[in-house]
Image (cartoon, grey):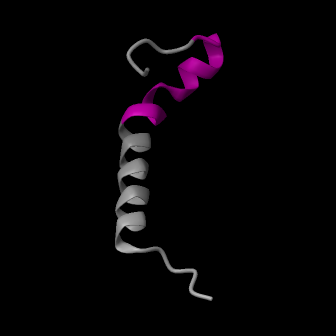
Amino acid sequence: MDFELTQEQELIRKTMCEFTEHEIKPIAAETDRTCAYPKGIE
């Protein structure tokens, strides 16, 4: 069996990693601390 990602799957993985680093990670600690749903991420 081949468990390698296709080019499309690799692009999706990379895009999600970048999104998480730039959009989610910077507000994660505050969101966890306040238990509030961040506005603008819908």
User: Which residue is found at the position 65% from the left and 13% from the top?
Assistant: 35
Looking at the rendering, the stretch of residues picked out in magenta corresponds to 23-36
User: Is 24 in the magenta?
Assistant: yes
Q: Is residue 27 magenta?
A: yes
Relative to 18, is 3 above or below?
Answer: below
In terms of image quadrants, where is residue 9?
bottom left
Q: How far across and how far down the image is residue 19, in percent?
A: 37, 42
In which quadrant will I find the C terminus?
top left
Q: Is residue 25 above or below residue 42?
A: below
Residue placed farthest to the bottom in the image?
A: 1
- What predominant SS class does the magenta segment belong to? helix
The answer to which of 19 and 29 lies nearer the viewer is 19
- In percent of width and height, residue 16 lies at 42, 49
Taking the spot 63% from the left edge, 89% from the top edge, the residue there is 1
The image quarter containing residue 20 is top left
Furthest-front residue in this view: 1
Of 14 and 3, nearer the camera is 3
Q: Residue at x 53, y 28 (%)?
A: 28
Vertical placement of 22 versus 16: above or below? above
